[in-house]
Image (spheres, rainbow, N blue to C red):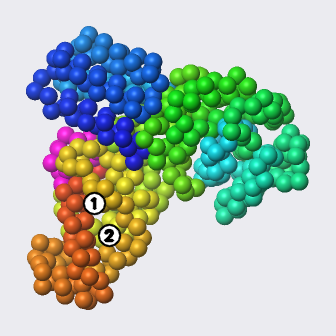
Amino acid sequence: MVLDSLSSSLRNTLRKIANAPHIDKDLIQDVVRDLQRALLQADVEVKLAFQLSKKVEERALAERPPAGTSSREHVIRIIYEELVNLVGEHHDIPLKPMKIMMVGLYGQGKTTTVSKIGRYFQKKGMKVGLIAADVHRPAAYDQLTQLAGPLNIPVYGDPKQKDAVKIVKDGLKDLKDAEVIIVDTAGRHSLEDDLIDEIKNISKVLKADHRFLVMDATIGQQAGPQASAFDDAVKVTGVVITKLDGSAKGGGALSAVAITDAPIVFIGVGEHIEDLEHFDPPRFISRLVGMGDVKALMEKAQEALDEDDAEEVAKKLLSGKFSLKDMYKQMEMLGKMGPLSKLMNMLPMGLSGGAKMPDGAVETTQAQLKKYRVIMDSMTEEEQEDPRIIKSSRINRIAAGSGTSPKDVRELLNYYKTMKKTMKGFTSNRKMRRALMKQLKLPDEM
């Protein structure tokens, strides 16, 4: 999960509000302290953290809940809205011919991000070309060609040329048929004068439509000064935050946008080339605090599955019936959509029945899926439909028949019980279930 520590703290704070017998000044002040602590531990800049928490306190004490909204729901909504304000506004990137210049310090994941953004626009149907203008890191050109090669995205570069500006000029001519041109510039370990001069010169030649600053989520509170320095040099138009999936302290990079007027445009949420998301503040914060992102879930389904499969996935997720046979089918379908852990984080926490998934429970690898399928293939139809009948003697028979161990069979059954408990959340909260049905345009009679 992106920013797992911050997410856990924020969810606990919201649960405290949801479970409170009533909302009063003492509870609000207690919640505000929890909110401050969570933001500071995530490396959000101190001043911003206190401004946000003060705003939450002022609004929670002064504003009356809208008609039809409880005090609890109103306070939760205020926290959600102020967190969205912290990370900036949604920034659309029109799908039209454009030139993008990528800047950032060394080691921030810039070259990998160039490929990921190229892939993003390629999936949108745009012709993409990349220019390798990092003349100071010998392996930069090779890395870019290795990443872009399997995607059939052309890369222009000249490892023998040490003039980055010339490479950009020649690259623009070579990639004249490309609709989206992305330039990878050099980084340094610090903001040295020659780095600033070089990117200024490239910017003049490129006349970029967008100038994206790439920042590692682990950078912490150094994010602010870096964002400011690059903004002074080339007027940054957007920020890309990398490695946000593995960082406990990504708040520094997230809140760096408050220092410049540049919005966060993309976030890196994994190592694979597809692990890049167009940043949408409301949807991002919704996932962070446990409200889910069903729209993103369905977008992933539509990308990976055909229309009938996508509808079947949605119906199964919202069904109260859940057998081993159902789980087998879901594993096959959800496996096409990406890691199950990321998909589960797109669902509101209320749908898990309040239960936290055990660590690693949803990190089902392809090897595990294959093993689970073999085990289930060794079960009778009756056992697949009603796993409750699978006791010790049946476990031993299934293990022998599938070439696995009784421990493996019990592991599968425990995984099934966890998933069944999670799926039951879909029917236990009718209000949330109906809201999801409406979003997914499915009949509520299911």
Identify the residue under disc 1. Answer: 316
Q: Which of 78/159 is in front?
A: 159
Q: Give the position of the C terminus as an image quadrant.
A: bottom left
Residues tagged 2 and 1 counted as in contact (Cβ below 8 A): yes
Which structural element holds mark 2?
helix
Residue bounds of the magenta highlight:
424-437
Gap in Å between the C-alphas at discs 2 and 1?
9 Å
Identify the residue under disc 2. Answer: 329
Q: Which of 206/362 is in front?
A: 362
Give the quarter of the image for residue 382.
Answer: bottom left
Which structural element holds mark 1?
helix
Residue 358 rendering spot, x and y as whole percentages: 27, 56
Q: Earlier in the sequence, mark 2 or mark 1?
A: 1
Q: Is residue 121 visible?
A: no
| Residue for point 36% across, 47% down | 346
Q: Which mark is residue 163?
A: none
Residue 126 rendering spot, x and y as whole percentages: 67, 49
Q: Is residue 425 magenta?
A: yes
| Residue for point 28% across, 27% down | 34
Q: Is residue 246 magenta?
A: no
Label 2 neighbour load within 10 Å: few <14, some 14-19, many 20+:
some
265 up-or-down from 304: above or below: above
**Of the residues shown, which amino acid type is indicated by label 2?**
Lys
| Residue for point 29% across, 83% down | 404
Label 1 neighbour load within 10 Å: few <14, some 14-19, many 20+:
some
Q: Main secondary structure of the magenta part?
A: helix
230 up-or-down from 219: above or below: above
Give the quarter of the image for residue 99.
Answer: top right
**Of the residues shown, which amino acid type is indicated by label 1?**
Lys
Q: Is residue 410 visible?
A: yes
Q: Residue 348 vs residue 4: left or right?
A: left
